[in-house]
Image (cartoon, rainbow, N blue to C red):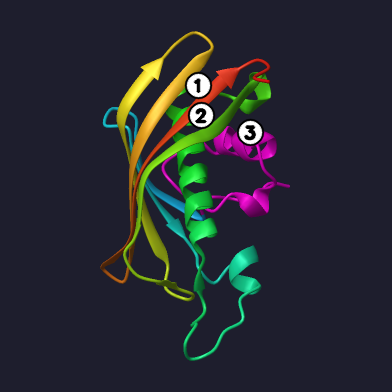
């Protein structure tokens, strides 16, 4: 049974998304969707930093290296958000032969460590989109906040293809 992601979306569509997502569910790093606006192409979501995170769990923690959400997990969260954009705003359905890949990190600014405990509030916005019959290219702006402080800011592009890529 797919986990339930609360939010302003069709529950049946979210269930189909999760059941056919390109990664197993534990790699989908979104725990709540607060806003999905197809017109403005924006999403606001939450990552519960108390959930099991594979790299965070493997950290050796001490006074000089505090427990935190790793950069790899922050980048994986951008992929989770990007896939939500592709599915809900552009019809790139994994169960209909679509796949997606991040293809460029134009900029990744890690502003401060994202602590384990407080939730991460994640904003994504499409800044440029090219839509074709079997290919969708989306450039995103990402801003992740924790306790009213900016943690991560990104400018990234992903490509989604219908049919075999390689």
Q: Where residue 31 sits: x, y (%)?
A: 51, 56
Q: Is residue 53 visible?
A: no
Residue behind mark 2: 87
Report which quarter residue 53 is drawn in: bottom right
Q: Residues within 10 Å of mark 3 (few under 14, many from 20)?
A: some
- Residue 16's mark? 3
Cα distance in 3D space between marks 3 and 1: 12 Å
**Mark 1: which secondary structure?**
loop
- Give the mark, 3 or 1, whose residue is nearer the N terminus: 3
Could you say which is closer to the camera, residue 98 or residue 6?
98
Could you say which is closer to the camera, residue 140 or residue 47?
140
Q: Where residue 55 sits: x, y (%)?
A: 61, 66
Which residue is pictured at 37% across the width and 54% down the height? 122
- Give the mark, 3 or 2, whose residue is nearer the N terminus: 3
Look at the image and give the residue range highlighted in magenta. 1-30
Cα distance in 3D space between marks 1 and 2: 5 Å
**Mark 3: which secondary structure?**
helix
Cα distance in 3D space between marks 3 and 2: 10 Å
Q: Where residue 17 sits: x, y (%)?
A: 60, 35
- Whether residue 91 sits left or right of residue 125 in the image: it is right
Residue behind mark 1: 91
**Vertical comparison of 36 with 7: above or below:** above
**Vertical comparison of 155 with 98: above or below:** below
Q: Residues within 10 Å of mark 2 (few under 14, many from 20)?
A: some
């Amino acid at each position: 049974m797919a986990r339930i992601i609360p939010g302003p979306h069709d529950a049946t569509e979210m269930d189909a998304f999760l059941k056919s997502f390109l990664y197993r569910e534990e790699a989908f790093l979104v725990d709540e969707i607060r806003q999905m606006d197809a017109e403005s192409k924006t999403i606001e979501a939450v990552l519960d930093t108390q959930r099991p995170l594979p790299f965070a769990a493997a950290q050796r923690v001490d006074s000089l290296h505090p427990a935190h959400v790793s950069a790899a997990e922050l980048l994986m969260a951008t992929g989770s958000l990007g896939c939500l954009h592709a599915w809900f705003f552009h019809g790139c359905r994994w169960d209909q032969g679509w796949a997606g890949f991040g293809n460029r990190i134009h900029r990744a600014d890690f502003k401060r460590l994202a602590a384990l405990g407080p939730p991460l509030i994640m904003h994504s916005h499409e800044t440029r989109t090219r839509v074709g019959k079997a290919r969708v290219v989306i450039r995103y702006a990402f801003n992740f906040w924790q306790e009213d402080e900016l943690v991560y800011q990104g400018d990234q592009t992903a490509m989604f293809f219908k049919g075999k890529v390689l």
